[in-house]
């Protein structure tokens, strides 16, 4: 395959045993995102900054070096579907090298997802569900008034109909998304079987400075655990 395209990508791909359940994979970070989630811990890579622009062969060369150690490649970000051509190149590269291919996405590009499913380029998708399926609640978190809940709902529906491995992941954040009723509403939407709750961890790279030092109390955590248990939702 002749690879010529450019990509906005951050750092070197690295080996992970936690990003894709039961699969040792290389993680590739695509730069740029259409959301500005207040709790995002990848704040430094949300803008398409030219300093991240490189030839995609730089990424595939690194992947080649690590390919004998892993079963798959997963692309995260940022929002990887904003760069469909390099995303396709890496997916095809994975196929040609007998590796599985996975994607982490915010779900705003159901068209790309449909195409990748049709071409059988995907083995795993982790879809971030930011909050309950109400546009005003979504916008409070994504800080993007043009957030398309229609696209996100379509992405959820596509995954539920698909035969690939997938997860819906919601990060519970103090003061933002944490109430039992919110967890129930999301679970009613996406179903409990493939739904994972993640607990926010404060860090200096979190986008909203007001969230850099907040964390759940023990009381709040035990309530979350209780709701998770009642609804059959895993907590990570
Ligand atoms: S959390 Fe994900 S979707 Fe939200 S701004 Fe960060 S990279 Fe984008």
Image (spheres, grey):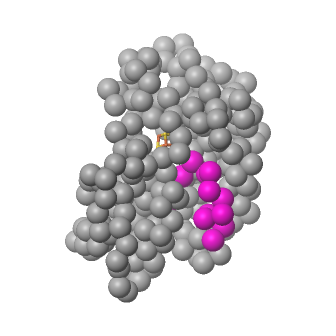
Q: Nearer the viewer, residue 236 or 118?
A: 118
Residue 115 place in picture, x, y as percent: 63, 71
Q: Is residue 208 above or below residue 150?
A: above
* Residue at 68%, 55% in the rendered image: 155
Residue lying at 65% horizontally and 21% vertically, measured from the top left? 179
Q: Is residue 215 above or below residue 187?
A: above
Residue 109 sits inside the magenta stretch: yes
Q: Residue furthest left?
A: 65
Residue 40 within the segment the image draws in magenta: no
Q: In which quadrant is the N terminus drawn?
A: bottom left
| Along the viewing direction, whichever of 74 and 206 lies nearer the viewer | 206
Expressed as whole percent of the image width and height from the top left, the position of residue 103 reads 50, 59
Q: How many marks?
A: 0
Q: Most extreme residue toward the bottom, as rendered? A: 1
Can I make out residue 16 in this image?
no
User: Which of these two is toward me, 184 or 156?
Assistant: 156
Q: Residue at x 61, y 51 (%)?
A: 107
The image quarter in which residue 13 lies: bottom left
Picture quadrant of residue 162: bottom right
Task: Identify the magenta region.
Answer: 99-115
On screen, residue 79 above or below 59 = above
Spot the residue most to the front: 50
């Amino acid at each position: 395959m002749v690879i010529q395209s450019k990509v906005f990508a951050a750092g070197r791909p690295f080996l992970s045993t936690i990003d894709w359940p039961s699969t040792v994979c290389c993680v590739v970070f695509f730069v740029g995102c259409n959301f500005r989630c207040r709790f995002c811990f990848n704040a430094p890579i949300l803008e398409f900054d030219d300093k991240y622009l490189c030839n995609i062969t730089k990424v595939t060369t690194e992947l080649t070096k690590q390919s004998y150690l892993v079963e798959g490649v997963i692309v995260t970000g940022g929002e990887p579907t904003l760069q469909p051509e390099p995303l396709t190149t890496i997916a095809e590269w994975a196929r040609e090298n007998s590796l599985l291919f996975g994607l982490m996405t915010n779900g705003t590009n159901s068209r790309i997802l449909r195409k990748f499913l049709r071409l059988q380029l995907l083995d795993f998708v982790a879809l971030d569900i930011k909050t309950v399926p109400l546009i005003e609640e979504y916008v409070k978190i994504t800080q993007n008034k043009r957030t398309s809940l229609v696209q996100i709902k379509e992405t959820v529906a596509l995954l539920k109909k698909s035969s690939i491995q997938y997860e819906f992941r919601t990060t519970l954040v103090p003061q933002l998304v944490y109430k039992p009723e919110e967890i129930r509403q999301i679970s009613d939407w996406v179903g409990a079987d493939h739904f994972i709750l993640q607990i926010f961890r404060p860090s200096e790279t979190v986008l909203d400075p007001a969230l850099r030092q907040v964390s759940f109390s023990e009381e709040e955590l035990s309530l979350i655990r209780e709701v998770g248990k009642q609804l059959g939702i895993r907590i990570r």
